[in-house]
Amino acid sequence: MDDVPNTLLPSWMADSLARSEAQIAAGETVPLEPVLNRIRASIERMQANKAAVTPARKA
């Protein structure tokens, strides 16, 4: 995120970014698959909600 000056970010986001960069520099990581699974589940819920509220189109 070197291309975005921290002055343009909300303080909570700048703090989170600084914390993340420190964790990366320290070699702290998390497995990617659980994160991807949560994202996939979220997408499925959003699609199901959209399908439930979107009326069927007439041909």
Image (cartoon, rainbow, N blue to C red):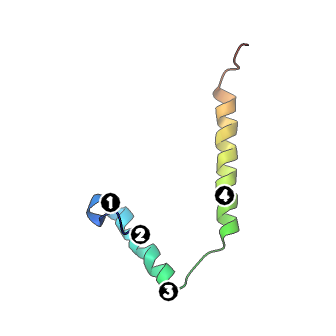
- Disc 2/disc 3 C-alpha distance (Å): 14 Å
Which disc number belongs to residue 38?
4
- 49 in relation to 23, above or below: above
Residue located 50% across and 86% down the image? 26
Category of crowding for the residue at label 3, using alpha-carbon neighbours closer than 10 angstroms: few (below 14), some (14–19), many (at least 20): few
Sequence-wise, the earlier of marks 3 and 1 is 1
Q: Position of residue 53 (x, y in %)?
A: 64, 27
Residue beneath disc 2 = 17
Residue located 66% across and 58% down the image? 38
Sequence-wise, the earlier of marks 4 and 1 is 1
- 42 in relation to 59, above or below: below
Q: Position of residue 52 (x, y in %)?
A: 69, 30
Q: Position of residue 44 (x, y in %)?
A: 70, 45
- 49 in relation to 53, above or below: below
Q: Nearer the viewer, mark 4 or mark 2?
A: 2
Residue located 69% across and 53% down the image? 40
Residue beneath disc 1 = 9
Residue type, label 3 = Ala
The secondary structure type at the circle numbered 3 is loop
